[in-house]
Amino acid sequence: TPTEGFLEEAGCPECRREVGEPLFESLEEWMPAVSDNFTCPLCGHEDDINGFIYLQPCAFSNLGFIFNNWGEAGFTQAFLDSFADWLDQPVTVVQVKLPQG
């Protein structure tokens, strides 16, 4: 997972406090499908991991697409809206910068 420039910041939707560090550490449980939920260590609020607040575009899903070296190409908002409607799920575009090497 590319993390260059990613701040790993997240907030609890209930208490509105920063919980990024424990949330991103919990991905070790989320990735193998142990749980889709995260519990705020500060107030005990439990929700689907996508229900938490992210300061940078961030998405967790069982379905993802990777398009390498697209530069400024990208998707129109109309396409994203239509795709989300077809999936009956929200769609998020997350752009990352891969390390040079």
Image: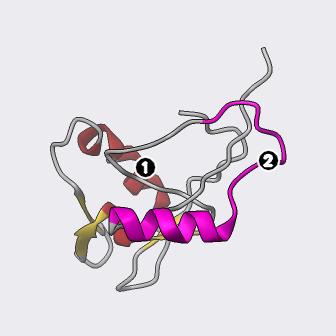
Is residue 90 visible in the rendered image? The answer is no
Q: Magenta residues, as a range?
A: 67-87
State the residue position of label 2.
73
State the residue position of label 1.
24
**Badge 2 local density, few (<14 within 10 Å), some, or many (20+)?**
few
Horizontal relation, residue 14 to residue 3: left or right = left
Q: Amino acid at mark 2?
A: Ala
Is residue 7 visible in the rendered image? The answer is yes
- Indicate the quadrant where residue 97 lies: top right
Name the residue at 47% across, 56% down. Answer: 59
User: In this rendering, which labeled residue sits more in front, label 1 or label 2?
Assistant: 2
Q: Position of residue 46 (x, y in %)?
A: 22, 72
Name the residue at 35% across, 67% down. Answer: 89
- Residue 35's tag is none
- Looking at the rendered image, the quarter that the C terminus falls into is top right
- Indicate the quadrant where residue 28 lies: top left
Q: Relative to 101, does residue 5 appear above or below in the rendering? A: below
Is 37 colored magenta in this rendering?
A: no
